[in-house]
Image (cartoon, rainbow, N blue to C red):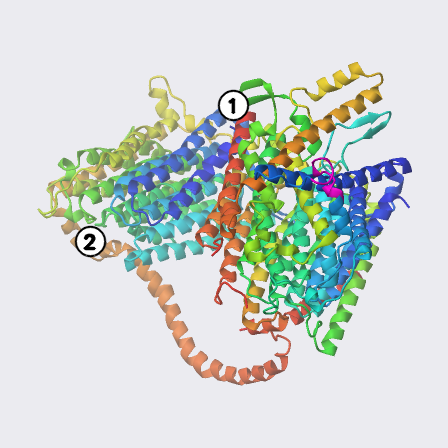
Amino acid sequence: MSQQTLMAILIFAPLVGFFINGFRYKKHSAEVAGTIATGAAVISFISALLMVIDLIGLPAEERRISVQFFDWITIEKLKVVAGFTIDQISAIMVLVVTGVGSLIHLFSIGYMHHDEGVAKYFAYLNLFLFNMLLLILGDNLLVMFVGWEGVGLCSYLLIGFWFTDKQKATAGMKAFITNRVGDAAFLLGMFVLFLTFGTLNFQEINHLVPLTSELTWLAPITMGTLFLFIGATGKSAQIPLYVWLPDAMAGPTPVSALIHAATMVTAGVYMIVRLNPLFMAAPNTMMIIATIGGLTAVMAASIGLTQWDIKKVLAYSTVSQLGYMFLACGVGAFGAALFHLMTHAFFKALMFLGSGSVIHAMHEEQDIRKMGGLKKYLPHTYLTFLIGWLAIIGVPPFAGFFSKDEILWQAFHSPRGHWVFWAMGALGAVMTAFYMTRLMALTFWGESRFSKKIHPHESPMIMLIPLFVLAILSAIGGWIGIPHVISEILPGQPGNFLETWLEPMIKTVPGTEHAEPSLEWGLMGISVMLAAISAMTAYHFYVKDPSKPKKIAASLGKLYDVVYNKYYVDEGYFCGIINPLVRLSKGIWFYIDVNFIDKTTYVISDLVRGSGLFVRGIQNGNIQQYAMYIGLGVVATMTYVLMR
Amino acid sequence: MQNSELIGEIGLTHYLILSALLFVAGMAGVLLRRNAIVILMSVELMLNAVNLSFVAFSHYLGQMDGQVMVFFVMTIAAAEVSVGLAILVSIFKRYKEINVRFFEHLKG
Amino acid sequence: MGHDIFEISINAIKLIVVFLLIVQAVPVLVWLERRGSAFIQNRLGPNRIGPFGLLQLAADAVKFFFKEEFVPANAVKLLYYAAPVIALIPATLAFAAIPLGQPVQWNEYLFRLQGYEINVGIVFVLAVSSLAPYSILIAGWGSGNKYALMGALRASAQVISYELALGLSIVGMILIYGTFNLTEMIQAQQAPLSYSLLGFTLPLNFLPAWGIFYQPLGAIIFFAASFAESNRLPFDLAEGEAELVAGFHIEYGGFKMLLFFIGEYGHMIVASALMVLFYFGGYAIPGISLADLNQWTADHTASANAASLLAGLLTFVCFFIKLSIFLWIFIQVRWTLPRFRYDQLMDLGWKTMLPWALFNTVLTATFVYLAHL
Amino acid sequence: MPLGGVIFIAIFVAVFGIVILFAASRFGTRKYDPVKFESYECGIPVQEKKDTKISVKFYLTAILFILFDIEIIFMYPWATTFRDFIKSGNGGYVFFSMLIFIAIFIFGLFWEVKSKALEWE
Amino acid sequence: MSADVFLFWFLAILTLAGGLTTVLVTNPIYSALSLAFTMIGVSALFVSLNAYFLAGVQLIVYAGAVTVLFVMVLMMFDLKHELITFTRGKISGLVKAGLVALFAGLIVGSVLITSDVFSKSGGAPEAVIGGDTTKALGTILFSKYIFGFEALGVLLLIVAIGAVALARSKGGTHAK
């Protein structure tokens, strides 16, 4: 099969699935709808795998499969081709998206089994996959933007999937509107880049970047990248646009796993990695990205410490981990960002699905205060969740350890980095370890606190298989990027596969020096140690001495309240922006509109009516007269052109 | 029949002027006739004129794109006629006559 | 058309001959139809004038000539007269594009045994036959009679409905032969039959590579649709006597009627010729490939010119035999099958033949794709 | 180029028809009778004018014919070039894009059948 | 005068005459028939420009389908003569006629002015795309314009549904 066919199958299989399930959206059979949708996703995954195998066969410098389907827009300089590219970066992403996507489709068959609109659900899920593939594989910004908008739409549809519940519908709208802010900035960034480079193609832009060099704040590349980054903060839930993500947990849990943990929210990171030479050329933007990323990591983690809803904890954890990825991008460690993106997709999808399994078992109960001791009821879920937990708090040799450590090390060591960034990252890691242990403790360990009426039951096999696969990936997924210092002491000295793979695509920060291995070992040791202490503390608090947290919370007083209420950001937005706006509008409406403008307009309207009577003859519904006006316009234009 | 020395006599300009005249004829029909069906036919005439110049350009500039455009224009013209005639039939059913002035009732 | 007066006049004469061929075929076919129907219905048919009643044709022609000429009061005179004349044109134009025999090479001149060689022959034939509804509509409206108008509307709705299935059934042929050119299509049917799929080949050397073996479904749809196209029974709804008296030519008589007849039989001839061309190897003699034939004629004649002429004649005769077989099927069907009801007719066209033709297209495309992968 | 030939034979046939009709009208007898020139309605005097009720179905059929005809015509260039596309390695792509087109076609046909636009009484 | 040139003038005059008749004749049925005639003329002109396939499509689509539809509708409604063929209003009529004349002058003028541009640029007036135009058309249609092709498929579907909906809007299935 030709590359073109394969690529078409890869991209359009989910779309076909969407159409099939979309037309039978009223059907109730989860098995049929799920099989169609999962089949589509698996077909996509297999063709992605085949293409990546082809890619590996190519020499390292030419690893790129480009397929151009048709000319989409051709206006003057703007020439947009519906072209798709698999290279080293998109290969990783496409495998993650289709692979994890297929698993989550499979999980959904079990999870959504009793739902009314199951065919609709799977149709949306497939549409999401299709748009995500557009986003990942598009070889220019516009195609990516189509996918970008498409996944936003699907996210909205799926968050508000149970739209009869007003709160959930509102959550969907919140996500959509917040994303629109970012999307507008993304468009602006695209305009700036097009004005600067005259093209929207990633490869061409990345080739053109070395020809320019600029360091000022208002220069086009900095402006463009900043706008793009604002777009990324919207989609990837960073300060200040992260508020939608926790609310997005209103959607079905597999959706949270797929869209709001593993794939869509990483689109911003992916976009930055894709354009890394461009961002590299704008150090000011990089600094901002690193700062925002670090702040988000710390702040979201601190909110996570206080949440009681199992999915909310995971949501804040996601925001925090995304902050890590942006921190990595900001210090120029794009490879590390992509690495963490991948491992995070594994373990966070695992934990979300695990939480889905728990919620399923607890009959839609999400409050962790009403759980506890589930270890013996849900042994398989517990086991897999345990692996996810080990991975996220960074216990070697689980996946999270390698990627998180890489980011921390780069934050410290890179010329664009700073010890402050490292400190932020380490603080985030400590808090992550704490709240994740807290989550484990309250859910699985200790005494059971749920009412006797509930009998938790282990999920069916169809839901457990994806958990097992993801657990294995979370355990070993990090081994493709083992840092040099560790590989030196390992038997056989495995190389850093990821680094060599990405090398032709990822620019290194100029001026990177070789570092002392001892320093790297030291930092690694400190962070792991801190995390371990933090985890142990949490274990102690929530399993051994459950009264302590309350005391600490009481002693912290106001501070705890602030954190518990998520720093009052939502309220802040309401007080600071939305309410004043509403009040201002009301004031303006009463004083200016009613008393002044309306009265003026009455006068004007009389004038208009008078002249309207006069001009009415022109727009009289007589189409021939309209045609005559068109003719007059054409004649005038032609005369002008000819006389010029 | 393709004696190369004689081909120069008929050139692109001939076809363009012919197409322009056909177009103008159609335009006159659109502006001056009262029967809505005849107006629709005049629109078809204009489209045909444009098609002719497309094909002429395609021939004399050696590019196929013009012909593809003609193909598309034909499709869209057919679509336009289908919908246009459907609307006209509805109007005819109501007023028992087809005259453009009945379209004035369509204004808001 | 050629470079000189000689070739132009040759071509002109050739075209006129082709036209006269159709005109002359009509009396023969009428006789055949009457004798044939009599045979089918256990009657005698015309048998008085001449041997087997053959001179009945001449008598009819004379009768037509002396019929009274009249125009109904309600008729629109110009259109009333124009319709029969227009009815002749599509069939003639289409028939002139059909190759009737192998081209004859006489010294430096190449005489094609066809009116004119057209690059996109299939499209041309379809395009010209798509003009057929005009004469029907003009006749129906021009004669100022409501039965005529109704008949015309019915007939033209029927013709255009079946044009869809007709046009679609050919797509499979074009997919297989990859050309619109009728001559090339005949050339492509000369090889021995073989089916190939995914690199495997099943040779059936004893059969020629005729279209019928590749496109049986397409052939059936095409043949059925061409019955409807030429307004023949069982599709002659236009002249359902019980409902519409005689359809769009109710007000016509004498020679005007005869011209309609020529047009209708012309369509029938074109349909049979296309059937032969697309699905039965055109003018090639079954069992003998064109190369063998040329070799044989070269061996048995003195000069190359004579050989070419002989081959042309043989293929011409062969084509006419094949053509006659299909014309006979047309006649036989007319006298065996009853007429459809109008809703049945439309259902057959839109809901049966069109979907099957689509299916045929998809199937053929899949096989072509797999065969050439 | 056969254009000249096509035009020639078209004109020739038209002239032939006109001449033959003219000749026939010369030879025929003529007798005037007012009833003869009435429209033929099986011998019954003409009931009403021509403007009888005619089903809109006819023109609906014609509209649908136009639309489907164009879709079929789009398949012709595809059919001629399909094998070339396969040879150049783009066969699958062209094949599937035509399959999508045909799927749209079938959907349209299905819709028309379902909406009873093709029912005759 | 070579046959080519003769054919062009012959066809041009016929086509133009057909076009003018379409616009000027008072009986809409004659209008429609002369429109069909014009379409056939344009198709012949396409042939003279080596666009064989398009010429066929022109006949099938325009002459064989679109104009047949016009004729059918006109015959169904039996619209013979209009009482007033052209729009009323002397002033607006004059303005429109003047506009048409002005437009004709402008467009012909601009073609004449720019004609030397084309002849200078060479343009290779040899039948650049000879013979196999159909295949070239297919190749470009199914590679460069594939998106437009699919979009037209959807458009035709929408039109089919819309036309049926419009045609069966209230008033029953029978005209008059």
Q: Report the residue that reaches farthest toward the front.
A: C48
User: What is the chain letter for disc 2?
Assistant: A
State left or right for residue C297 relative to residue B74.
Answer: right
Q: Identify which residue, A13 or B85, lies in the foreground.
A: B85
Query: Mark 1 near mark 2, Cβ–Cβ under 8 Å?
Result: no
From the image, which quarter does the C terminus of chain E lie in? bottom right
Can residue D40 be found in the magenta stretch? no
Q: Residues within 10 Å of mark 1 (few under 14, many from 20)?
A: few
Residue in front for this viewpoint, C180 or B25? C180
Give the residue displayed 63% in from the left and 66% down from the top. E78
Number of on-image labels: 2
Q: Indicate whether D9 appears above or below A182.
A: above
Residue at point 70%, 27% (across, down):
C318
Magenta region: C48-58
Residue C17: where, in percent of width, then height? 80, 38
Q: Residue at x 61, y 31 (%)?
A: C279
Q: Is residue C51 magenta?
A: yes
Q: Amino acid at mark 1?
A: Leu
Residue A29 left/right relative to A503 = left
* Nearer to me, A1 or A465: A1
Residue corresponding to mark 2: A556
The kind of residue tagged 2 is: Leu
Q: Select label 1 or label 2 by which is in front.
A: 1
Residue farthest to the left, as pictured: A452
Residues at discs 1 and 2 both on one chain: no
Q: Chain of mark 1?
A: C
D92 vs C67: above or below: above
Q: Which mark is residue C198?
A: 1
Crowd rating for badge 2 (residues with CA inside 10 Å; few <14, some 14–19, many 20+)? few
